[in-house]
Amino acid sequence: MFSDPVHGFVSVPKGLILDLVETPEVQRLRRIRQLGLGHMVFPNAEHNRFGHALGAMALIADALQHLSEKGTPVSKKEAEAAMITALLHDVGHGPFSHTLEHVLFADFHHEQMSRAVMADLNDRFSGRLQRALDIFDDCYERPFFHQLIASQLDMDRLDYLRRDSFFTGVAEGVVGVERIIKTMRVHPLEGGINALLMIERKGQYAVENYLIARRLMYWQVYLHKTVIAADIALKSVIEYARRLALKPASPAFAFFLGQRLSGKDVADPNVRRQFCALDDTDVEFSIKAWARDHDPILSDLADRFLNRRLLRVQFGEQPPSETILRKIRTRVIDWLTKTKRLSVTEAENVLPFYFEHTSVRVKGYGKVTDTIQVVDRYDRVMELSAVADNAIIRALAEPQEKWYIAFPKEVEVGDVWMS
Amino acid sequence: MFSDPVHGFVSVPKGLILDLVETPEVQRLRRIRQLGLGHMVFPNAEHNRFGHALGAMALIADALQHLSEKGTPVSKKEAEAAMITALLHDVGHGPFSHTLEHVLFADFHHEQMSRAVMADLNDRFSGRLQRALDIFDDCYERPFFHQLIASQLDMDRLDYLRRDSFFTGVAEGVVGVERIIKTMRVHPLEGGINALLMIERKGQYAVENYLIARRLMYWQVYLHKTVIAADIALKSVIEYARRLALKPASPAFAFFLGQRLSGKDVADPNVRRQFCALDDTDVEFSIKAWARDHDPILSDLADRFLNRRLLRVQFGEQPPSETILRKIRTRVIDWLTKTKRLSVTEAENVLPFYFEHTSVRVKGYGKVTDTIQVVDRYDRVMELSAVADNAIIRALAEPQEKWYIAFPKEVEVGDVWMS
Amino acid sequence: MFSDPVHGFVSVPKGLILDLVETPEVQRLRRIRQLGLGHMVFPNAEHNRFGHALGAMALIADALQHLSEKGTPVSKKEAEAAMITALLHDVGHGPFSHTLEHVLFADFHHEQMSRAVMADLNDRFSGRLQRALDIFDDCYERPFFHQLIASQLDMDRLDYLRRDSFFTGVAEGVVGVERIIKTMRVHPLEGGINALLMIERKGQYAVENYLIARRLMYWQVYLHKTVIAADIALKSVIEYARRLALKPASPAFAFFLGQRLSGKDVADPNVRRQFCALDDTDVEFSIKAWARDHDPILSDLADRFLNRRLLRVQFGEQPPSETILRKIRTRVIDWLTKTKRLSVTEAENVLPFYFEHTSVRVKGYGKVTDTIQVVDRYDRVMELSAVADNAIIRALAEPQEKWYIAFPKEVEVGDVWMS
Amino acid sequence: MFSDPVHGFVSVPKGLILDLVETPEVQRLRRIRQLGLGHMVFPNAEHNRFGHALGAMALIADALQHLSEKGTPVSKKEAEAAMITALLHDVGHGPFSHTLEHVLFADFHHEQMSRAVMADLNDRFSGRLQRALDIFDDCYERPFFHQLIASQLDMDRLDYLRRDSFFTGVAEGVVGVERIIKTMRVHPLEGGINALLMIERKGQYAVENYLIARRLMYWQVYLHKTVIAADIALKSVIEYARRLALKPASPAFAFFLGQRLSGKDVADPNVRRQFCALDDTDVEFSIKAWARDHDPILSDLADRFLNRRLLRVQFGEQPPSETILRKIRTRVIDWLTKTKRLSVTEAENVLPFYFEHTSVRVKGYGKVTDTIQVVDRYDRVMELSAVADNAIIRALAEPQEKWYIAFPKEVEVGDVWMS
């Protein structure tokens, strides 16, 4: 039993589940922050992925108990399997995951690694995780189990939204988790082959609020401009170190930095072993060492990350014009040559670590794939946007994109590009 | 100093403000529930208008302190006046206000009564409330004071949303009150003369969330179908008692029931005196007495209200057709004749107390009048819907309307009208 | 399912329990405030006994589920009975219960009335409440069920402490309800036959905190000096009205005011019927009417209650001396003769309504009867004070008593008696 | 402005204070957990000392504003100085401070280092921290400023109790911070010259609750047996590494491990420089490296720490007897020889890393030094234990001591020593 300020208490059943919690693979999640670099903006949001894994597991246990009280039978084995899927669904996350995923691997998604590590654990535990794997793969015969862990209303998202809102103090992310779970149903109830997870009509406002809260959390937290600036700082110092062919003190980190692996390499047991040895500590420690390096660019980039001297990130609703980009690029190069004593060529060479422009996107609520089904008191099933305050859900269907430019605060650009 | 579970502590300055708090007019608000009949659905939401008045006053004090730290000077006299306006803005609410307003008066809005009672208090306190009245009337020279008490982002709404969400436990109404206040600024409109209340751009998501929370609270709480059913029950028993020309034990209630006053009568001091003697107690007590009346319809209507045997309210996105209405009307009359031993004529006569159909509406965020202005770091001012996630604000601009039919649960209507 | 801001959601099972919730006896609890006159000090604490009854029922359901997961089998029938006991345990509370109990009856405890009303309901529901009655009476074969509703750690107290702390905003009353429930176990007493409710050792600090929080809530809320002053105001106006032989508009209230019933009269079905018709509304309405009475003392006492012009209550650690009492008494009489135009004899006659002195007491944690048993990992059972931080529990064993004098604020007594 | 889930928002004034927040010395606190190893038991309690420093600063700003509203004038310069003292009061904490303090230094208290680093910053900021230093040293002319940062009721303790309770979810630590601050006053001691911080009598229960909450937090969190076990694991692996004369990859950590510094060495600027380069990352990274070491004891100790395979800690109210200690020692040695393939001499040599017994102590509320003064409405000053519920405060005056034995879970000791 763990005390969790978000959910109260989380019970961990003795036996297989407790044994899994105690594996090094799961314990490693203690050393990986849930929010990546969110703590750079929200200094109290240092919570880790281990707490989230336990929280998602607790929510799935609640949801299954509730569903079975509503008439959908759930066997003990099924409940255990679903809890394991929740516990392990993020076990393949690496340090500063969303930021470093593409630095460590090309063509990679952390779910591949989660899947592979779960399979390794299944081998180690003599096949006792097979049903959990089936649920993860969505090939279990009752598909609502998969939906509970991977769909618009899965326990993963419900937990992380609630948790991230709690630790950042961002009221806009508060979600009625309990109400959503209490208005869930498996329909048709008997749990036949195609019975799916649905929301009763009286839960529709809680679901609307949840979809909107998720979007607001993206702009207020996950894609906060200082978080983006910290992401750039992290990627820059690592890519620059890689360019210098530095070998960090951490063997696992050195392993990934010394080559360009791709998603396919997850199949290699050694890659998985090295990956499971890697956590936030390795990365932070290396950056602390680099801050003392004699290479002035490396030490500058490292110090910027460590002491939060981040680039300025300026948002815009439209992509910046070529003219604007050219202007800023020129000023950054100018600043580099003057303050870092670089030649123009050298400055152009390191420019990518001091100047970035691209866009960020928040996906819309998808009406065609991955939708939410609502069931009314007459057992009629409708897609959420057909029931609810249509205009708002329709508005949520549109993805949002914002462009940004990032450059050192010391570079004076005036109001070249006003966001 | 009052302990307030919503805001922590509310300080009441000694002198004029404390004296006003202790007047019978303000103490009366202790006996008027903030949510009217909301406690019929949310049994713990018994909070009264007195707590809300103190809360709005506390928020306005916070906002003014914050604004003055940001560079907008606020004199002690102005702060006092603004706090008084907040304290008294709802002093003209009667018992079960939104429900009974139009039973007690024709053509009336509670703001008229608040204004009139404030003027009475101003007389009694030798004109010391004049500035508060000016702010209330929006004729004070600095219009942002009026905005703080009556605009899209006023402290009235911020307090009641936060408070109602707290006491009902409806997570969908959680609003980032502190963030909204901390991102407020007083800034001149472009080309305009008068400085107005604006939101800094970094507050835009908190404001979006607030607008959406407000809409969700309407459907989840204020217009919850059981609240509507309780409203009908209350109005029905009172209108029926009025038809019988009953004289309730409460002289003030008898005063209003014995005639049909209109908004203009607020000018009569005796009407105001009677009004200030009226609270939830008078109404509830009378209904308890009527429940023991020998008139079987009156006692039935009263008992339905008291013991929560409410009509069934069925919502629909479209108005019900004449055919449907006719069908249900027939069945209700049929049920009345059989169970109440009434002739058909008698049943038709009491039908309005057992059958109702109309619609409820939630106003949209108005883009032309009463909008929210946002100011960015370059001091540019934009209307909220021009800045933010346009689609969602645009969606909020549309008012929402829902139709309903209400009839006794005992009447079997099948799926005549599926909402 | 009710939304409860304290516990989240409270499920009400359909069938017998829902039917009981809908009885007039239970619905009446909606019109009786949980805190009596606590809202006079904590204006947002208007919560009613109905919410508490549901909350206690929800906690007992949680506790039983938890105990059965820990190995103590609980049948469906038993769970239902225990939930009913919790729902109905306070059904015999009257309006402003702790204050008026002894005004309405001599020699009475509300538990007698709860028991009698439960028995009436048992008759009406054809004996289906028998097991609940047995649990209430502590003659059910498994005594821990009774402990869950009536013992040091019962769900009644856990709910009301948590709830009252929530609505008053008094942080000192926050109690780890969930931790206490999660560390409960049913365990046989050493050598004993019957398994009893115990706390696992790791719950000891939560229990200590709970015992201390309870004591602090007494002084901060239940026995707050302004609450005592309001209690006096309420009792005074009613006793004075009784002396005048006034007949209030409420027949039920008139019934009780017109005679001096005693606890034995609970046996009379008519007394119970009248009692079940009585709630806060009757009392408040009558006092509002008395405030308009031509008797100047009655209208003064009523107005003092309504508009919170309460007596000053001054606490002391020792009883006041006769000299002090005489001095204050003289000044109060003096004040009465001058301001109320009474003769000295008349003033002496009404003195008891304007001057009171007595003491209030908080019971200690009883080490001999009604103690808390703790069980350690070796299944050894100890009484709490033998385990925990002895000194603190020992301190809690001592009852606390404080003396007070109450007199009108207008009477100048200087520092005659400094508390 | 930082979002803080505990206090809402924390404002950081631009200028000197913001500049100090941005120094590497303060930014380093982001990488030092507030609770040392508390996250081993409470997985969501990863909050860092930076958040606490900001929180204490915010509370002191609140307290000063409140005191000035109550009539104690506070100049802008004084407020700034007090906020700086709060911000920097813990700047001398090292990684896993309470655990490693005595591993890194002999005869050392982190306050020495905080003082020295503050002095360094004062030099760097041209003496602008002098008043903050005077407050820290308690030689500022108005002693209540020092009390606000270092006394029974200082903002340091109020913040960390509230914060630790928030992140661990331990309800027993909830403290009425706002009530305590709102009932503070600066008042001259009777007969004394200097005005000191006091609590108004109506705050006494909040203070009692705070003293008890602090004690409960010690046993529930700070001295939780698993936290103690983690402390032992951390000290063991580091002391063993030092014995092997290993040189960790972190130069700063190597600096401290390679010698035995004492408190006096704080005077050496290089020692301070090295210390300010050290944070949790260095220690955790080194332990991760040691887990791969070929020395089987080192890798075992490191792995035990990393993967939470901690010693069993068994508490007792009395010191264990020599017989008991001898028995357990023998079994541990036996287990070491068998499982680690050590000779008896070798096993005896590493025994201290696998077996520990000592006691932990919680200091009592001191009645003579460092007491809390209460002032009543007649301006009489009393020491808290003379006012309040004496028995409880008297109980709190007694320190509490508990003994424990720690040994590997794999060693079977039966019930040799039952706590």
Image (cartoon, coloured by chain):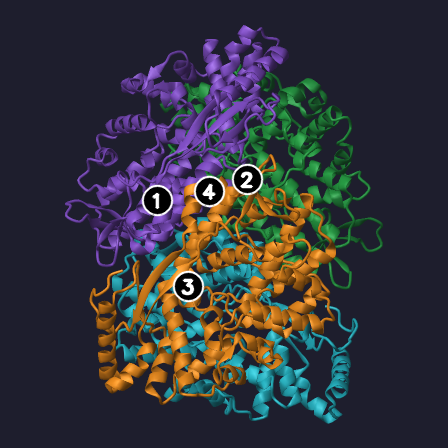
Chain colours: A cyan, B green, C purple, D orange
Q: Residue at x 43, y 62 (%)?
A: D222
Classify 10 Å Cα crowding around label 2: few (below 14), some (14-19), many (20 and above): many
Name the residue beneath numbered marker 3.
D42
Is there one chain holding both mark 1 and mark 2?
no
Name the residue beneath numbered marker 1.
C394
Q: Percent x, y for residue D88?
A: 61, 65
> Between tags 3 and 1, which lies in front?
1
> Between tags 3 and 2, which lies in front?
2
Classify 10 Å Cα crowding around label 3: few (below 14), some (14-19), many (20 and above): many
Q: Percent x, y for residue C117?
A: 30, 26
* Cβ atoms under marks 1 and 4 closer than 8 Å: no
> Between tags 2 and 4, which lies in front?
2
Q: Is residue B4 left or right of residue C257?
A: right
Provide the chain ID for the residue under circle 4: C
Q: Is residue C10 left or right of residue B363?
A: left
Q: CA distance from mark 1 to mark 4?
A: 25 Å
Q: CA distance from mark 3 to mark 2?
A: 36 Å
Name the residue beneath numbered marker 4.
C165
Q: Amino acid at mark 2?
A: Arg
Q: Nearer the viewer, residue C292 or A214?
A: C292
Name the residue beneath numbered marker 2.
D201
